[in-house]
Image (tube, rainbow, N blue to C red):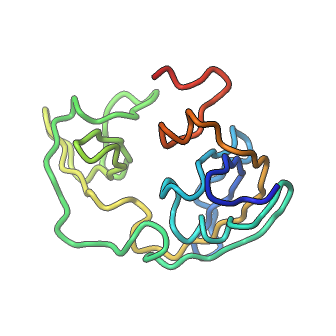
Amino acid sequence: MQITKDTAVEFHYTLSEAGEQIETSTNAEPLTYLHGTEGMLPGLEAALEGKAVDDKFSVTLEPKDSYGEYQEGLIQRIPIKHLQGLGNNKVWKPGMSAIVESNQGRHQVSIVKVGRFNADCDLNHPFAGKTLTFDVEVVSVREATAEELSHGHVHGAGGCGH
């Protein structure tokens, strides 16, 4: 089966910039998404169109096709209690990434400065302004279920709990 609109897709990726690996999913769960619903980076989704299980390819994306251009002046003070993703670290430090829930959804931000109760955060995605290369291996492709289509995302083995 080929990747087309309304298919549920799983793939592994390795992300690099200028030959330096940034992150990979190869030792973890594959990334899943619903094709054709704007849930994936535009350039990566276009490259996945028409691919099938076991296809391997590499695609290099300019900022406009991935996380956008870096925008100056997107620093915002956010209460520390609203930052998610600290993991096993004890405290937030400059340079760390955090997840913030807003009325526009979840956003990844970079910590610039940490105070006692607030942190100054760069609202640009950490990969904004970067030309990125994705090495991709398609793991599975199937028709999305009616429930997945109505929810706008792929469900795991146990459903999504809605």
Q: Name the residue rendered at 68%, 65% in the picture.
A: 48
45 up-or-down from 160: above or below: below
Q: Quadrant of residue 73?
A: bottom left
Q: Is residue 48 left or right of residue 162?
A: right
Q: Name the residue rendered at 37%, 47% in the picture.
A: 96
Q: Position of residue 49 (x, y in %)?
A: 68, 67
The one of 12 and 10 positioned closer to us in this rendering: 10
Q: Is residue 129 left or right of residue 50?
A: left
Q: Quadrant of residue 69?
A: bottom left
145 up-or-down from 15: above or below: above
Q: Position of residue 157 (x, y in %)?
A: 68, 25
Q: Position of residue 87 (x, y in %)?
A: 45, 29
The image quadrant where one finds the C terminus is top left
Q: Is residue 19 left or right of residue 82?
A: right
Q: Is residue 97 left or right of residue 38?
A: left
Q: Name the residue rendered at 31%, 37% in the picture.
A: 92
25 up-or-down from 49: above or below: above
Q: Extreme right residue here?
A: 54
Q: Position of residue 22 (x, y in %)?
A: 58, 59
The one of 135 and 75 positioned closer to us in this rendering: 135
Count of numbered marks: 0
The image quadrant where one finds the N terminus is bottom right
